Amino acid sequence: MGQLVFWRNEGEAAELPPVKDNRLSVDFPAIAENEQLARMLVSAFLTPLDPTMEELSDVKTAVSEAVTNAVIHGYPKADERNKIHMFLENRNRLLTVTIVDYGVGIEDIALAMEPMYTSKPELERSGMGFAFMKAFMDTLEVKSSKSEGVTIVMSKVIGEEKGDNREHE
Amino acid sequence: MSPLFEIRKNFLVIKVKGELDHFMADQIRLLSDTYLEGTRIHNVIFDFKDTTFMDSSGIGMIMGRYKQVKRLNGRIYAVHVGPAVERIINISGLHKLLRVARNVDEALEEK
Ligand SMILES: Nc1ncnc2c1ncn2[C@@H]1O[C@H](COP(=O)(O)OP(=O)(O)OP(=O)(O)O)[C@@H](O)[C@H]1O
Ligand SMILES: [Mg+2]
């Protein structure tokens, strides 16, 4: 039986272990409790890619922002039929996260994405959700129109830092 | 995990345990009002020692507490700020509104 061993030393480049491509597709009700569930799912999905603490926290934050937005803004009226769809994909260390809601939608996407803009200041929202998604992921795409719901597609290469290390040797 | 509240002098110390998200932000907002509304407590210390995660819901909740105590010349402190919380605080500009101290005792001494 063969065995592959990978190790990382300070300042020494490490080989990135090969990881099989993977997908996960889930639907869950739009309730605040499921924001944590979504973060846990994406953390578990990333585990085989051995992400750094920073990568893991970046992705968890971005997912949390997108799901929280669907819960708070997408469905202003609570109803058990309110649904969020999450699709995770890993292709050769490129993580793509798609989060879809079928709620009220966004009329002016450019305005919504401006840092500090919020339509709900009375709920003490800070208007930083999109800013964090943009800061913590490599790409961010927002698709929506009024009463058509919102689709967020964001991606990030996992293991980039380690990969860079290797190239600079 | 639930947040822990403690009164020290005229400070409210809020120990944020676990993940400071939408769910916990709502909990802290609700509970802190009973300590801050119509009392002599005008300062809030957020203790992030056991905080593993924070997102924009946390930012909004802290900004809300800032506005609440500012009217009474109170201050907001953040102590035991780890890397996860620090990045979120810096990107959002929240670091301009609050004071960072190493621990609760240091924050208490400052005022
Ligand atoms: N899924 C959604 N459905 C409908 N509107 C949305 C959705 N997501 C975002 N928006 C709109 O975009 C605005 C900006 O979103 P963003 O996440 O940046 O800030 P916020 O949610 O208002 O505040 P924060 O994220 O800091 O708590 C929201 O106030 C809302 O008007
Ligand atoms: Mg938001």
Image (cartoon, coloured by chain):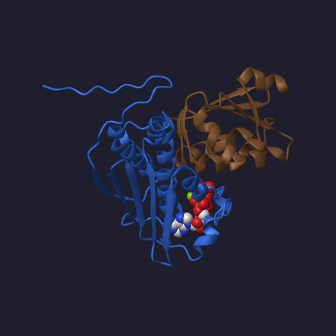
At which x and y percent is residue B17?
54, 32
Count of numbered circles on the image: 0
At which x and y percent is residue A12?
46, 26
Residue A85 vs A60, above or below: the answer is below
Where's the N terminus of chain A, which quadrant?
Answer: top left
Tell me the residue at 77%/26% (across/down).
B107
Which residue is situated farthest in the front direction here?
Answer: A169
Q: Is residue A83 left or right of residue B91?
A: left
At which x and y percent is residue A14?
40, 30
Residue B97 visible to the viewer:
no
At which x and y percent is residue B93?
72, 48
Q: Pick whichever, A56 or A2, lies toward us.
A: A2
Chain that the image shows in blue: A
Residue A143 vs B97, above or below: the answer is below
Residue A114 vs A8, above or below: the answer is below
In terms of image quarters, where does ligand 2 lie? bottom right
Q: Pick whichever, A32 or A158, lies toward us.
A: A158
Residue B32 vs A89, above or below: the answer is above
Q: Pick whichever, B87 or A93, lies toward us.
A: A93
Tell me the residue at 46%/58% (across/down).
A154
Chain that the image shows in brown: B
Tell me the residue at 40%/66% (across/down).
A82
Residue A89 visible to the viewer:
yes
What is the quadrant of residue B4 in the picture? top right
Tell me the residue at 66%/55% (across/down).
A126
Q: Is residue A148 left or right of residue A18?
A: right
